[in-house]
Image (cartoon, rainbow, N blue to C red):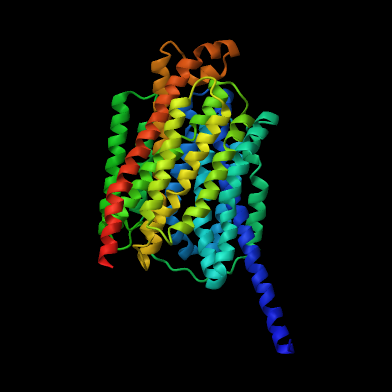
């Protein structure tokens, strides 16, 4: 090797090493958020006992977090442009770390839910802003390797989060599940500040504050009306109508203003609308039903949080494997075919769960069915988004990603609130004399709980059936409208 070549290699090596380190730092930040999302689900039954609160209240620890994500998704690109991606990322993860500490110190449901909102506001920015840092700081030929590091949390988090949550709750306290993410968040903030490329002068493009003022209250009021069981039916309907009206006003405004918060006009393209419909229906069912199994294990059967966390591992593994396979298949096979197979698998797993769920059903059987559903999800979410994104280019590409991400997060929040409310109503219907709902069941002696278990499981099956219906509708849309749209595009080529 010549002296000039050696000098050139020495110059390139540090840059490559630094880019890899940037990917690892961003991956660490992403891991904090994924862990936080997965560990909180397992903790809900423990939080019900700790605060003497019903499931309808404590599910807001998940729903409020998702609603906060809805707020940050459309802001990520705008904030990064105005203030600099590195500054926004570091600020966001510091907010997330502070909120995690506040969640661990919470004295009641209200303070915990408020801390979860703050976590969502900080954590929701990390993934989109992290991608901006990669796009700006890494050459195109190296982005695949660096972004693969950002994808590690998606695989590691769902595997480690539930079992880590169960172990911490059983061995220490529910507070530990929030404190555990504070140190890595601080480390990630320091590393990103040191390794990320410096921010360039920002663009002062105006922010649609009015649109944001319609989107956030509209989403919150809609979900609140759907999920708050303590309100009268009239009040809940009024809240949902108000929320839908605000969201409608947001859509109408976004179509008129020059610089909208989101380019919602993309949803008027039939192919985009069809793909988003499938993602929304499936997201509401899949993510909305995630609270059901931890509740069944810990409340109805009285087993440990560690057991509830362990049961999530096969589904996480199946999702990760399926995701890797299906994201490669969409380059060779029509996406609607991949999505249809994924929905069919998820539907089979969900129907199987409804059919076999009893007070003494083998955990091995339930884990196998959950793995089947998880494998199906890997064939729906990313392939569905890929199919929609193929229709976009230029400025619509980033906005389309935000629109689909927002729709999916909002669907997850609505699904969580709706299925949880249905579970509470089904339990009240099956056990009419039960005062305090599932929170009261969690405090019962084993004998008393066992006596009520058949009726409680019947209520759980009703809630699970809602997920089955939503997935079935998504499958119908995929096999008809999505297929027709795909065939039409192939005919035009």
At which x and y percent is residue 34?
56, 46
Picture residue at 31% right of the left edge, 27% below the top: 235
Residue 238 seen anywhere in this rendered image of the structure: yes
Displayed quadrant of residue 463: top left
Quadrant including the N terminus: bottom right
Classify residue 145 as left or right of residue 14.
left
Residue 141, placed above or below residue 190: below
The x, y position of residue 51, in whole percent, is: 56, 25
The residue that appears at 55% across and 58% down in the rendered structure is: 89
Residue 92, x across and y down, in percent: 55, 53
The C terminus, quarter of image: bottom left
Q: Residue at x 34, y 43 (%)?
A: 475
Asked if residue 139 can be seen in this view, the reply is: no
Q: Nearer the viewer, residue 352 or 137?
A: 352
Q: Position of residue 349 (x, y in %)?
A: 46, 36
| Total labels drawn | 0
């Amino acid at each position: 090797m010549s002296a000039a070549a050696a000098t050139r290699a020495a110059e390139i090596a540090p840059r490559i090493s630094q880019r890899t380190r940037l990917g690892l730092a961003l991956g660490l930040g992403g891991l904090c958020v994924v862990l936080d999302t997965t560990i909180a689900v397992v903790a809900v039954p423990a939080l019900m006992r700790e605060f003497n609160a019903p499931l309808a209240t404590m599910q807001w620890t998940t729903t409020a977090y998702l609603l906060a994500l809805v707020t940050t998704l459309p802001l990520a690109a705008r904030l990064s442009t105005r203030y600099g991606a590195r500054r926004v990322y570091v600020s966001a993860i510091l907010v997330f770390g502070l909120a995690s500490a506040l969640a661990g110190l919470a004295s009641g449901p209200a303070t915990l839910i408020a801390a979860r909102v703050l976590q969502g506001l900080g954590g929701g920015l990390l993934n989109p802003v992290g991608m901006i840092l990669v796009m700006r700081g890494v050459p195109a030929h190296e982005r695949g390797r660096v972004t693969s590091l950002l994808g590690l949390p998606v695989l590691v988090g769902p595997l480690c989060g539930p079992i880590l949550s169960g172990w911490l709750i059983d061995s220490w306290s529910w507070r530990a599940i929030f404190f555990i993410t504070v140190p890595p968040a601080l480390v990630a903030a320091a590393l990103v500040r040191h390794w990320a490329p410096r921010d360039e002068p920002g663009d002062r493009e105006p922010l649609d504050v009015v649109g944001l003022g319609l989107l956030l209250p509209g989403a919150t009021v809609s979900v609140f009306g759907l999920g708050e069981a303590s309100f009268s039916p009239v009040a809940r309907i009024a809240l949902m109508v108000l929320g839908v009206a605000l969201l409608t006003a947001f859509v109408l405004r976004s179509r008129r203003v020059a610089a909208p918060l989101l380019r919602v006009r993309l949803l008027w393209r039939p192919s985009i609308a069809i793909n988003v419909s499938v993602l929304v229906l499936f997201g509401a069912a899949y993510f909305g039903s995630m609270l059901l199994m931890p509740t069944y294990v810990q409340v109805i059967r009285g087993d440990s949080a560690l057991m509830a966390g362990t049961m999530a591992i096969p589904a996480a593994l199946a999702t990760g494997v399926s995701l890797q396979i299906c994201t490669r298949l969409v380059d060779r096979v029509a996406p609607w075919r991949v999505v249809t197979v994924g929905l069919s698998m998820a539907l089979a797993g969900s129907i199987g769960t409804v059919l076999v769920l009893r007070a003494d059903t083998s955990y091995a059987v339930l884990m196998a069915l959950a793995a089947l559903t998880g494998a199906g999800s890997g064939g729906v979410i990313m392939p569905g988004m890929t199919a929609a994104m193929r229709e976009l280019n230029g400025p619509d590409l980033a906005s389309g990603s935000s629109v689909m991400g927002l729709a999916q997060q909002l669907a997850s929040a609505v699904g969580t609130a709706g299925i949880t409310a249905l579970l509470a109503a089904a339990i009240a219907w099956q056990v009419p004399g039960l005062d305090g709902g599932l929170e009261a069941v969690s405090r019962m002696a084993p004998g008393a709980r066992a006596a009520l278990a058949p009726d409680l499981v019947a209520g759980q099956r009703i809630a699970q059936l809602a997920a089955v219906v939503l997935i079935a509708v998504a499958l119908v849309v995929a096999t008809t409208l999505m297929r027709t749209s795909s065939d039409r595009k192939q005919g035009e080529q």
